[in-house]
């Protein structure tokens, strides 16, 4: 199920985590060549992706909210 990004925070290893509308968290790492998300590396890039929908596996598994 796709859910909109509503915010971000850094985890304990300084990796960016998207906060989704469904109240689940999802890492959004820029870690080439495995994942290329250059937008994660800047504040402007992250702000531009607010509202963008990501696939949430936690919703599909009916997991409780993260926050």
Image (cartoon, rainbow, N blue to C red):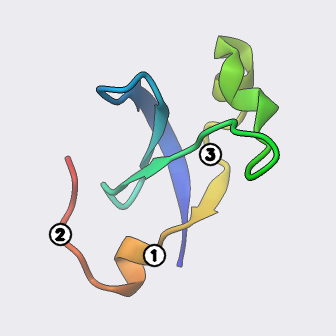
Residue 51's image quarter? top right
Percent of width and height locating residue 25: 37, 51
Label number found at residue 57: 1
Figure disc tally: 3
**In the current view of this chain or complex, which residue is farthest to the front?**
33
Secondary structure under badge 2?
Answer: loop
Name the residue: 67% across, 49% down.
52
Instruction: Give the number of the mark in front: 1 or 3.
Output: 1
Secondary structure under badge 3?
Answer: loop
Q: Is residue 30 above or below residue 67?
A: above
Task: Please rate how many residues cluster around mark 1, counting C-alpha atoms within 10 Å: few if below 14, some from 14 to 19, many from 20.
Answer: few
Mark 2 or mark 3, which has the lower sequence index?
3
Label number found at residue 51: 3
Instruction: Give the number of the mark in front: 2 or 3.
Output: 2
Q: Relative to 40, is 60 on the left or the right?
A: left
Label number found at residue 64: 2
Name the residue: 78% across, 41% down.
32
Mark 1 or mark 3, which has the lower sequence index?
3
Depth check: give the residue in front, 32 or 3: 32
Q: Is residue 29 above or below residue 42?
A: below
Mark 1 or mark 2, which has the lower sequence index?
1
Depth check: give the residue in front, 35 or 56: 35
Name the residue: 21% across, 61% down.
65
> How far apart, in angstroms, are the residues tagged by discs 1 and 2?
12 Å
């Amino acid at each position: 199920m796709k859910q909109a990004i509503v915010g971000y925070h850094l985890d304990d290893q300084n990796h960016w985590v998207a906060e989704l509308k469904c109240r689940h968290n999802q890492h959004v790492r820029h870690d080439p060549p495995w994942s290329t998300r250059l937008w994660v590396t800047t504040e402007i890039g992250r702000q531009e992706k607010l509202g963008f929908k990501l696939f949430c596996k936690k919703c599909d598994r009916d997991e409780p909210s993260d926050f």
